[in-house]
Image (cartoon, helix red, strand yellow):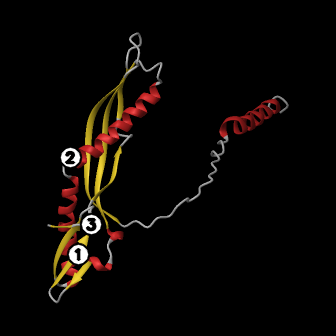
Amino acid sequence: MFKILPWVVILILGGALYYFAIGRQAPPPEVSFATVIEKVEAMGKMQLVRYQISDAVEYVKPSGSRFVPDAKAMLIVTGEAIGCVDLSKVKQTDLLKTDSTLTLVLPAPELCVFKVDHKKSRVYDTKFTRITGQTKIVDEAFEKAESQIEKTALDNGILEETKKNAQLILKPMLEQLTGKKVAISFAMPSEKVEKL
């Protein structure tokens, strides 16, 4: 019996050691937040068109020296542009009713979002960025790419497309709700009204 006792003690100590050192799960990580809602805004912009845009961007920043090569960044960029109408700007005077028709003057369509999707975009290559700093060059390249997304969307008629979709979505809905024939027109940025 005395020969078994040391083995029993070793097994108990070994089991305890295993439990405290290995077998016990580590507590979950502690996370603390100090979240503050800084601003609450009422949203009245109805998004009507979304353009998905891809681009290959080569950004060259001149070094200003004959002895130092120009810094370059090459990006594959994916982004989006969204056309919308701000319904919060519609006033009571923008709605004209007769017995059989309803005329609604909507604010001019606008490009409410244009941005690079950084999750889908990537830096393809950089060259000679050691002096200027790679991060700075890449940030500047993405900034130029975002401006190009805005220009591409506007050049390809996103505002006209927004007008068409406003007609397609709002006109049948308003006719259904009011039981009247509906005509929709758009105020121009100069406050003129353009009839579709």
The 10 Å Cα crowd at callout 1, few under 14, some 14 to 19, many 20 or more, is: many
Nearest to the observer: residue 187 or residue 126: 187
Q: Amino acid at mark 2?
A: Asp
Secondary structure of the residue carrying tag 2 is helix
Q: x%, y% of residue 143?
A: 38, 38
The residue shown at (79%, 31%) is 4
How far, Cα to Cα, is label 2 from label 1? 27 Å
Neighbours of disc 3 within 10 Å: few (<14), some (14-19), many (20+) = few
Q: Earlier in the sequence, mark 2 or mark 3?
A: 2
User: Residue sitting at 37 percent across and 67 percent down?
Assistant: 44
Q: Is residue 85 above or below residue 94?
A: above
* Quadrant the C terminus occupies: bottom left
Quadrant of residue 106 within the rendered picture: bottom left
Amino acid, disc 1: Leu
Q: Which mark is residue 191?
A: 3
Separation of disc 2 and disc 3 at Cα? 22 Å
- The mark found on residue 104 in the picture is 1
Q: Is residue 12 above or below residue 137?
A: below
Residue annotated with mark 2: 155
At numbered mark 3, what does the secondary structure look like: helix, strand or loop?
A: loop
Relative to residue 44, is residue 50 drawn left or right? left
Front position among marks 1 and 3: 3
Q: On residue 184, which mark appears?
A: none
Which secondary structure, mark 1?
Answer: strand
Q: Amino acid at mark 3?
A: Glu
> Which mark lies nearer to you, 2 or 3?
3
Compared with 126, 103 (above or below) is below
